[in-house]
Image: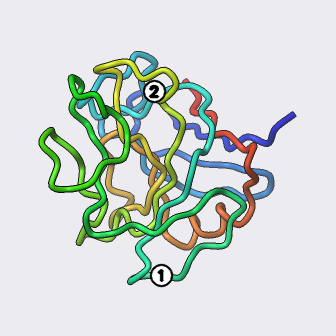
């Protein structure tokens, strides 16, 4: 059986939780509206379910290549992630400038210095079901996310060292 990262919180509406993987246990931030099984684009919820870890992206000007068994690539200033439900590249990486709405991956707030793309709504992609659901660096005080899972940078780096290519994340109801 493939190893699983498990994310739990005290209630469905809680914006903080605990992430466990083997003997690792870290506090984490969740979506500002908690967790939701029927996630929709822009609802601020972290989706409930089991999702593979797809790839790691990092800012090479801010940290060295992270040690992990997952596919890894540097983030460049033009990198984005499409969050426009009607666009043909919805929930896919894109290059800026981009004609439709797309998140900028090269951010000044350090939240995307280290990003793990999760396999949420990517095979198949369903318009409006949510995009850019990542594991990333947490803001000060574990500030709630827009629907992602966020960890303190040292915790995320430690987790990435421990996971394998077949590790998935299970976000519990």
Q: Residues within 10 Å of mark 2 (few under 14, many from 20)?
A: many
Image height of 128 relative to 114, above or below: above
Image height of 51 relative to 79, above or below: above
Residue that appears at 59% across and 69% down: 157
Nearest to N terminus: mark 1 or mark 2: 1
Q: Quadrant of residue 82?
A: top left
Residue that appears at 73% across and 40% down: 4
> Residue farthest to the right?
1
| Nearer to me, 70 or 6 | 70
Rendering coords of residue 76 (x, y %)? 34, 69
Quarter of the image with the C terminus is: top right
Q: Is residue 25 left or right of residue 54?
A: right
> Residue farthest to the left?
99
Residue that appears at 25% across and 63% down: 78
Residue that appears at 72% across and 58% down: 24
List the residue tagged with mark 1. Answer: 63
List the residue tagged with mark 2. Answer: 121
**Label 2 secondary element:** loop
Q: Is residue 53 left or right of residue 153?
A: right
Quarter of the image with the N terminus is: top right
Rounded to the nearest angstrom, the CA distance separating label 1 from label 2 is: 29 Å
């Amino acid at each position: 059986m493939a190893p699983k990262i498990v994310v739990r919180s005290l209630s469905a509406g809680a914006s903080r939780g605990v992430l466990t993987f083997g003997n690792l246990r870290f506090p984490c931030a969740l979506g500002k509206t908690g967790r939701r099984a029927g996630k929709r684009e822009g609802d601020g919820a972290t989706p409930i379910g089991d999702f593979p870890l797809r790839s790691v992206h990092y800012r090479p000007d801010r940290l060295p290549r992270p040690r992990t068994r997952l596919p890894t690539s540097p983030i460049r200033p033009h990198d984005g992630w499409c969050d426009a439900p009607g666009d043909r590249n919805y929930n896919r990486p894109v290059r800026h400038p981009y004609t439709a709405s797309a998140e900028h991956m090269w951010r000044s707030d350090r939240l995307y210095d280290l990003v793990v793309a999760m396999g949420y709504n990517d095979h198949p992609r369903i318009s409006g079901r949510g995009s850019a659901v990542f594991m990333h660096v947490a803001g000060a005080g574990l500030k709630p996310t827009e629907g992602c899972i966020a960890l303190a940078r040292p915790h995320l780096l430690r987790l990435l060292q421990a996971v394998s290519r077949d590790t998935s994340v299970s976000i519990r109801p």
